[in-house]
Amino acid sequence: MSQDLTAPGGLTRLFVEAPLAGGELVLNEDQSHYLAHVLRARPGDTVRLFNGKDGEWRATIAAIGKRAATLTLAARTLPQTGVPDIWLCLAPIKRTPLDYVTQKATELGVSRIQPIMTRRTIVARVNLDRMRANAVEAAEQCGRLTIPEIGEPASFDKFLSEWHGDRQLIFCDEAGEAPPAAEALRGRSHGPWAIVIGPEGGFDPAERSRLRQLPFVVPVSLGPRIMRADTAALAALAIWQSTLGDWNFAS
């Protein structure tokens, strides 16, 4: 007897690179292994697929083996939708918190995650493939139809020198005087925006000074307590979403 792997309490949404427009497609080895050995799927079972361009599709497993699963596309269940144009720009933090931030930022609807290397950044290398894998998994689970773009790490100076001034940049300044984030954002344009978060210990004085002098930067406060970098990133995203993003359903 076949089962609906998309039913509540079951699964599954899978991100694929292939076009979705009817016909058949073959999953990669990892996804095929997941269906066969984790979900114990069988021919006739159904899943949902998305690729960031063609909406969400319902598909039936036509054949499944150890290394390949063939799916037949049945019908599009959701039209393609996007997310607000909000970037999260942050100094990389040690592996587990960065995994967590990538997953939760994806759930919060961020469109791009941009690692920046500041003077106090202690992480020398960023595993972009791992970040993307975390983003894909989070998108599959939370129902969004796109995957956030993962930017190549950039130095702080390069990050600012190549900035497009039409994108406003929220600077979460834990060391200087700034209005509360919700107050600073209320009534402003709905996009495009970005949020910049420093490393553990914050930006150094020269970096802070440069940020505060730029016309497209909006300094904000996240409250009276000192937050970890990963907490600050998610708090700032939640505030932006509730004031200017797609949580603000009246906008």
Image: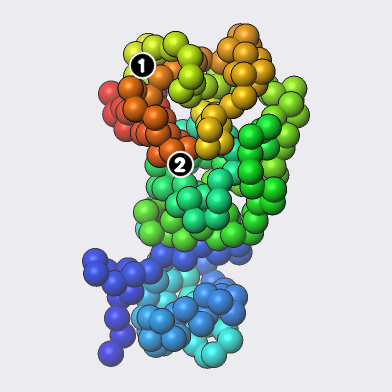
Alpha carbons under labels 2 and 1: distance apart:
19 Å
Q: Position of residue 18 (x, y in %)?
A: 61, 64
* Residue displayed at 69% across by 24% down: 160
**First along the sequence among labels 2 and 1:** 1
74 or 49, which is in the foreground? 49
Classify residue 184 by image quadrant: top left
| Up-down relation of residue 3 to residue 211 (above or below) | below
Circle 2: element type: helix
Mark number, residue 230: 2
Which kind of residue does numbered mark 2 sit on? Asp
Does the rendering let one see residue 128? yes
Classify residue 81 by image quadrant: top left
Does the rendering let one see residue 21? no
| Up-down relation of residue 226 to residue 178 (above or below) | below
The residue tagged 1 is 180
Q: Position of residue 231 (x, y in %)?
A: 40, 39
Mark number, residue 26: none
How many numbered marks have been drawn onto this rendered protein structure? 2
Q: Quadrant of the C terminus?
A: top left
Which kind of residue does numbered mark 1 sit on? Pro
Mark 1, Cα crowd under 10 Å, few <14 / some 14-19 / many 20+, is some
Circle 1: element type: loop
